[in-house]
Amino acid sequence: MLNFSFPKKATEWSPWLDSLALLLWGGLLLKYAITGQLALLIHPNYFGLSIAAGLVLLFLGLGKLWQNLNPSLYPGDSMQHISLLPQNLGSLLLILVAIAGFIVSPSILASQTAIQRGLTDDLPLTRSQPESFRVGAKPEDRTLLDWIRTLNAYPEPDAYTGQPVKVSGFVTYLPQLPENYVMVSRFVLTCCAVDAYPVGLPVQLSDELPKPESDSWVEVEGEMITREFELSPEETEAGVERRQLVIVANAVNPIPTPKNPYDY
Protein backbone atom coordinates (compact mmCIF):
# COMPACT_ATOMS: atom_id res chain seq x y z
CA MET A 1 0.00 0.00 0.00
CA LEU A 2 1.35 3.40 -1.01
CA ASN A 3 2.19 5.87 1.73
CA PHE A 4 2.01 9.15 -0.19
CA SER A 5 1.63 12.69 1.07
CA PHE A 6 1.73 15.82 -1.08
CA PRO A 7 5.03 17.72 -0.68
CA LYS A 8 4.71 20.93 1.32
CA LYS A 9 8.30 22.14 1.77
CA ALA A 10 10.87 22.97 -0.91
CA THR A 11 13.15 20.21 0.37
CA GLU A 12 10.34 17.69 -0.06
CA TRP A 13 10.04 18.56 -3.76
CA SER A 14 13.66 17.66 -4.52
CA PRO A 15 13.26 13.86 -5.02
CA TRP A 16 10.19 14.41 -7.21
CA LEU A 17 12.01 16.90 -9.41
CA ASP A 18 14.97 14.53 -9.66
CA SER A 19 12.77 11.66 -10.84
CA LEU A 20 10.97 13.92 -13.33
CA ALA A 21 14.29 15.13 -14.75
CA LEU A 22 15.50 11.55 -15.20
CA LEU A 23 12.26 10.49 -16.90
CA LEU A 24 12.20 13.48 -19.23
CA TRP A 25 15.80 13.09 -20.35
CA GLY A 26 15.42 9.36 -20.85
CA GLY A 27 12.28 9.95 -22.90
CA LEU A 28 13.95 12.72 -24.91
CA LEU A 29 16.87 10.52 -25.96
CA LEU A 30 14.50 7.72 -26.99
CA LYS A 31 12.28 10.21 -28.83
CA TYR A 32 15.28 11.41 -30.86
CA ALA A 33 16.16 7.80 -31.69
CA ILE A 34 12.62 6.82 -32.74
CA THR A 35 12.03 9.91 -34.90
CA GLY A 36 15.46 9.74 -36.57
CA GLN A 37 16.47 13.13 -35.17
CA LEU A 38 19.43 11.56 -33.43
CA ALA A 39 21.21 11.62 -36.81
CA LEU A 40 21.11 15.43 -36.68
CA LEU A 41 22.94 15.52 -33.36
CA ILE A 42 25.58 12.79 -33.12
CA HIS A 43 27.68 10.36 -35.13
CA PRO A 44 25.97 7.00 -35.92
CA ASN A 45 28.68 5.22 -33.94
CA TYR A 46 27.10 6.65 -30.77
CA PHE A 47 23.47 5.79 -31.55
CA GLY A 48 23.59 2.62 -29.47
CA LEU A 49 25.18 4.42 -26.53
CA SER A 50 22.54 7.16 -26.64
CA ILE A 51 19.67 4.67 -26.73
CA ALA A 52 21.21 2.73 -23.85
CA ALA A 53 21.62 5.97 -21.89
CA GLY A 54 17.96 6.81 -22.51
CA LEU A 55 16.83 3.43 -21.23
CA VAL A 56 19.06 3.71 -18.15
CA LEU A 57 17.70 7.18 -17.36
CA LEU A 58 14.13 5.93 -17.69
CA PHE A 59 14.91 3.00 -15.41
CA LEU A 60 16.51 5.30 -12.82
CA GLY A 61 13.62 7.74 -13.05
CA LEU A 62 11.05 4.99 -12.51
CA GLY A 63 13.10 3.66 -9.60
CA LYS A 64 13.29 7.11 -8.05
CA LEU A 65 9.55 7.55 -8.56
CA TRP A 66 8.83 4.24 -6.83
CA GLN A 67 11.08 5.28 -3.97
CA ASN A 68 9.16 8.57 -3.62
CA LEU A 69 5.84 6.74 -3.56
CA ASN A 70 7.10 4.30 -0.91
CA PRO A 71 9.29 6.34 1.47
CA SER A 72 8.80 3.86 4.32
CA LEU A 73 10.63 1.18 2.32
CA TYR A 74 13.70 3.38 1.87
CA PRO A 75 15.11 5.01 5.03
CA GLY A 76 16.37 8.53 4.53
CA ASP A 77 20.01 9.17 3.80
CA SER A 78 21.73 10.84 6.74
CA MET A 79 24.71 12.02 4.66
CA GLN A 80 25.04 15.73 3.95
CA HIS A 81 25.35 16.57 0.24
CA ILE A 82 27.12 19.67 -1.02
CA SER A 83 25.48 21.41 -3.99
CA LEU A 84 26.85 24.30 -6.01
CA LEU A 85 23.33 25.38 -6.97
CA PRO A 86 20.41 26.43 -4.76
CA GLN A 87 17.91 23.79 -3.67
CA ASN A 88 16.07 22.22 -6.65
CA LEU A 89 17.58 24.67 -9.17
CA GLY A 90 19.70 22.04 -10.91
CA SER A 91 16.76 19.69 -11.41
CA LEU A 92 14.56 22.55 -12.59
CA LEU A 93 17.13 23.55 -15.20
CA LEU A 94 17.38 19.96 -16.46
CA ILE A 95 13.57 19.73 -16.65
CA LEU A 96 13.25 23.00 -18.57
CA VAL A 97 15.95 22.01 -21.08
CA ALA A 98 14.34 18.59 -21.60
CA ILE A 99 10.91 20.17 -22.16
CA ALA A 100 12.48 22.56 -24.69
CA GLY A 101 13.97 19.53 -26.44
CA PHE A 102 10.51 18.00 -26.82
CA ILE A 103 9.04 21.26 -28.16
CA VAL A 104 11.87 22.45 -30.44
CA SER A 105 13.13 19.99 -33.05
CA PRO A 106 16.87 19.97 -33.80
CA SER A 107 17.72 21.84 -37.01
CA ILE A 108 20.20 20.98 -39.74
CA LEU A 109 23.41 22.99 -39.81
CA ALA A 110 23.31 25.35 -42.78
CA SER A 111 25.31 27.92 -44.75
CA GLN A 112 25.57 30.61 -42.08
CA THR A 113 27.04 28.11 -39.64
CA ALA A 114 29.39 26.85 -42.36
CA ILE A 115 30.75 30.36 -42.90
CA GLN A 116 31.11 30.95 -39.15
CA ARG A 117 33.00 27.68 -38.76
CA GLY A 118 35.53 28.51 -41.44
CA LEU A 119 34.29 27.08 -44.72
CA THR A 120 36.53 29.51 -46.59
CA ASP A 121 39.56 28.45 -44.55
CA ASP A 122 39.21 24.83 -45.70
CA LEU A 123 39.48 25.52 -49.43
CA PRO A 124 42.47 23.51 -50.64
CA LEU A 125 45.38 25.59 -51.86
CA THR A 126 47.90 24.71 -54.55
CA ARG A 127 51.36 23.39 -53.86
CA SER A 128 54.10 25.04 -55.84
CA GLN A 129 55.89 21.71 -56.37
CA PRO A 130 53.42 18.84 -55.98
CA GLU A 131 54.58 15.27 -55.75
CA SER A 132 53.27 12.35 -57.79
CA PHE A 133 49.89 11.06 -56.70
CA ARG A 134 47.23 8.64 -58.01
CA VAL A 135 43.61 8.20 -57.07
CA GLY A 136 41.93 4.82 -57.42
CA ALA A 137 38.26 5.79 -57.20
CA LYS A 138 36.40 6.87 -60.33
CA PRO A 139 35.85 10.66 -60.35
CA GLU A 140 32.10 10.37 -61.00
CA ASP A 141 31.74 8.04 -57.99
CA ARG A 142 33.38 10.39 -55.49
CA THR A 143 31.27 12.17 -52.93
CA LEU A 144 31.98 15.76 -51.95
CA LEU A 145 33.98 14.53 -48.95
CA ASP A 146 35.93 12.16 -51.21
CA TRP A 147 36.94 15.09 -53.40
CA ILE A 148 38.04 17.13 -50.39
CA ARG A 149 40.12 14.25 -49.04
CA THR A 150 41.67 13.72 -52.46
CA LEU A 151 42.58 17.40 -52.71
CA ASN A 152 44.02 17.41 -49.20
CA ALA A 153 46.24 14.49 -50.17
CA TYR A 154 47.29 16.04 -53.48
CA PRO A 155 46.21 19.70 -53.80
CA GLU A 156 47.16 20.21 -57.44
CA PRO A 157 44.03 21.31 -59.36
CA ASP A 158 45.48 20.61 -62.80
CA ALA A 159 45.64 16.91 -61.96
CA TYR A 160 41.84 16.74 -61.95
CA THR A 161 41.01 19.07 -64.84
CA GLY A 162 38.44 17.57 -67.17
CA GLN A 163 37.32 14.85 -64.77
CA PRO A 164 33.54 14.30 -64.45
CA VAL A 165 31.94 15.09 -61.12
CA LYS A 166 28.56 14.45 -59.51
CA VAL A 167 28.17 15.64 -55.92
CA SER A 168 25.37 16.80 -53.66
CA GLY A 169 25.19 19.28 -50.80
CA PHE A 170 23.63 22.52 -49.64
CA VAL A 171 24.23 25.86 -51.33
CA THR A 172 26.41 28.50 -49.69
CA TYR A 173 27.12 31.96 -51.10
CA LEU A 174 30.52 33.42 -50.23
CA PRO A 175 31.12 37.16 -50.67
CA GLN A 176 34.67 36.65 -51.96
CA LEU A 177 33.52 34.52 -54.89
CA PRO A 178 32.27 36.01 -58.18
CA GLU A 179 28.52 36.43 -58.65
CA ASN A 180 28.17 33.37 -60.88
CA TYR A 181 29.76 31.09 -58.27
CA VAL A 182 28.25 29.18 -55.37
CA MET A 183 29.66 26.66 -52.94
CA VAL A 184 28.25 23.15 -52.69
CA SER A 185 28.88 22.23 -49.08
CA ARG A 186 28.37 19.61 -46.42
CA PHE A 187 29.18 19.20 -42.74
CA VAL A 188 31.39 16.38 -41.50
CA LEU A 189 30.70 14.89 -38.06
CA THR A 190 33.44 13.33 -35.97
CA CYS A 191 31.42 13.07 -32.75
CA CYS A 192 28.42 15.39 -32.63
CA ALA A 193 26.96 18.50 -34.26
CA VAL A 194 28.94 20.74 -31.92
CA ASP A 195 32.28 19.71 -33.47
CA ALA A 196 30.97 19.38 -37.06
CA TYR A 197 33.15 21.16 -39.63
CA PRO A 198 32.16 22.28 -43.15
CA VAL A 199 33.71 21.24 -46.46
CA GLY A 200 32.82 22.46 -49.93
CA LEU A 201 33.84 23.14 -53.51
CA PRO A 202 33.15 26.18 -55.71
CA VAL A 203 30.64 25.73 -58.52
CA GLN A 204 30.70 27.92 -61.64
CA LEU A 205 27.20 28.53 -63.00
CA SER A 206 26.47 29.43 -66.60
CA ASP A 207 23.94 32.09 -67.55
CA GLU A 208 21.48 29.35 -68.59
CA LEU A 209 21.42 27.79 -65.13
CA PRO A 210 19.19 29.40 -62.47
CA LYS A 211 20.85 30.39 -59.22
CA PRO A 212 19.79 28.05 -56.41
CA GLU A 213 18.67 29.52 -53.11
CA SER A 214 21.02 29.59 -50.17
CA ASP A 215 20.73 26.49 -47.94
CA SER A 216 18.80 24.58 -50.61
CA TRP A 217 20.04 21.06 -51.38
CA VAL A 218 21.23 20.38 -54.91
CA GLU A 219 22.95 17.72 -56.96
CA VAL A 220 25.63 19.21 -59.20
CA GLU A 221 26.82 17.49 -62.37
CA GLY A 222 29.69 18.80 -64.46
CA GLU A 223 33.45 18.62 -64.81
CA MET A 224 36.47 19.93 -62.99
CA ILE A 225 38.53 22.88 -64.15
CA THR A 226 41.18 25.13 -62.60
CA ARG A 227 40.46 28.78 -61.92
CA GLU A 228 42.61 31.54 -60.45
CA PHE A 229 41.09 33.69 -57.70
CA GLU A 230 42.20 36.96 -56.15
CA LEU A 231 44.65 36.62 -53.29
CA SER A 232 44.33 38.13 -49.86
CA PRO A 233 47.28 40.25 -48.62
CA GLU A 234 48.32 37.46 -46.25
CA GLU A 235 48.36 34.89 -49.05
CA THR A 236 50.32 37.22 -51.32
CA GLU A 237 53.03 37.67 -48.66
CA ALA A 238 53.15 33.90 -48.06
CA GLY A 239 53.60 33.21 -51.80
CA VAL A 240 50.43 31.14 -52.03
CA GLU A 241 48.97 30.41 -55.45
CA ARG A 242 45.21 30.71 -55.46
CA ARG A 243 44.57 28.19 -58.23
CA GLN A 244 41.35 26.56 -57.17
CA LEU A 245 39.62 23.43 -58.38
CA VAL A 246 36.17 24.45 -59.59
CA ILE A 247 33.14 22.50 -60.79
CA VAL A 248 31.79 23.80 -64.09
CA ALA A 249 28.14 22.85 -63.73
CA ASN A 250 26.25 21.29 -66.60
CA ALA A 251 23.21 20.70 -64.38
CA VAL A 252 22.15 21.82 -60.92
CA ASN A 253 19.15 19.77 -59.81
CA PRO A 254 17.28 20.48 -56.55
CA ILE A 255 16.97 17.48 -54.26
CA PRO A 256 15.10 16.92 -50.99
CA THR A 257 17.00 17.51 -47.77
CA PRO A 258 18.38 14.07 -46.85
CA LYS A 259 17.32 12.43 -43.61
CA ASN A 260 20.99 12.15 -42.71
CA PRO A 261 22.58 15.33 -44.11
CA TYR A 262 26.08 14.84 -42.72
CA ASP A 263 29.22 13.05 -43.89
CA TYR A 264 31.54 11.12 -41.60
Image: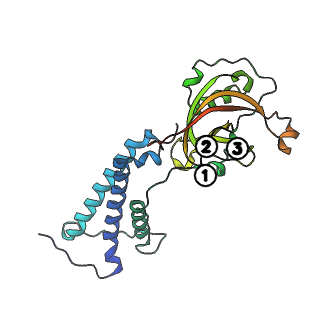
Q: Left or right: 259 with respect to 144?
A: left
Neighbourhood count class around disc 3 (C-alpha, 10 Å): few under 14, some 14–19, many 20 upward: some
State yes or no: discs 1 and 2 in contact (Cβ < 8 Å).
yes
> Looking at the image, is 76 positioned above or below residue 245?
below
Which amino acid type corresponds to the residue marked 1 in the rendered image? Thr
Q: Position of residue 184 (x, y in %)?
A: 61, 40
Residue named by callout 2: 198
> Looking at the image, is 222 positioned above or below residue 182?
above
Real-space CA distance between mark 1 and mark 2, rounded to the nearest whole angstrom: 9 Å
Q: Which numbered dot is residue 113?
A: 1
Q: Quadrant of the N terminus?
A: bottom left
Q: Which numbered dot is residue 233?
A: none
Q: Residue at x 37, y 42 (%)?
A: 48
Q: How is the image coloured?
A: rainbow
| In-front residue for pair 40/221 | 221
Q: Left or right: 33 with respect to 168?
A: left
Real-space CA distance between mark 3 and mark 1, rounded to the nearest whole angstrom: 12 Å
| Secondary structure under the numbered disc 3 in the rendered image | helix
Q: Position of residue 160 (x, y in %)?
A: 69, 23
